[in-house]
Image (cartoon, helix red, strand yellow):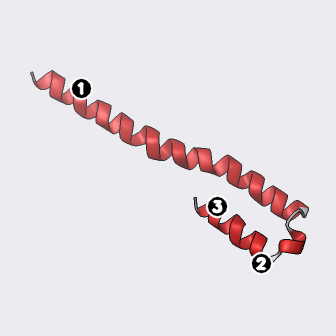
Amino acid sequence: MFCFLKTHAFKQRYRAFALTPFSYKFFNACKVFIPIIDFKIVFIPTLKYQAKLQRVSNAY
């Protein structure tokens, strides 16, 4: 999300240079980082939740 906002602002500010190698690299970097961030947001809480479930089932 942050990367998307940044690219959007970048494109507005430098519309004429929107397709320069720099913006292309920047966009590619975002495409790499966004899934990593999503993975952390989705996967890590899931692991914690599963650990909690295991503790509850062990208690019974």
- Residue picked out by circle 2: 13
Disc 2 residue crowd, few under 14, some 14–19, many 20+, Cα 10 Å: few
Instruction: Tell me the tag on residue 54.
Output: 1
Image x and y of residue 56, in percent: 16, 28
Q: Secondary structure at mark 1?
A: helix
Q: Nearer the viewer, residue 4 or 37?
A: 4
Mark 2 belongs to which amino acid? Answer: Arg
Give the mark toward the camera: 1 or 2.
Answer: 2
Q: Considering depth in this image, is 33 or 11 the residue closer to the camera?
A: 11
Q: Earlier in the sequence, mark 1 or mark 2?
A: 2
* Residue type, numbered disc 1: Gln
In the displayed structure image, the side of residue 13 where residue 17 appears, left or right:
right
Q: Residues within 10 Å of mark 1 (few under 14, many from 20)?
A: few
Q: Residue at x 20, y 29 (%)?
A: 55
Residue indicated by mark 3: 3
Residue 39: x and y, percent?
A: 52, 41
**Residue 49 as seen in the image, left or right of residue 25:** left
Question: What is the quadrant of residue 10 in the picture?
Answer: bottom right
Q: Identify the element where label 3 is drawn.
A: helix
Amino acid type, label 3: Cys
Q: Earlier in the sequence, mark 3 or mark 2?
A: 3
Callout 1 touching callout 2 (CB < 8 Å): no
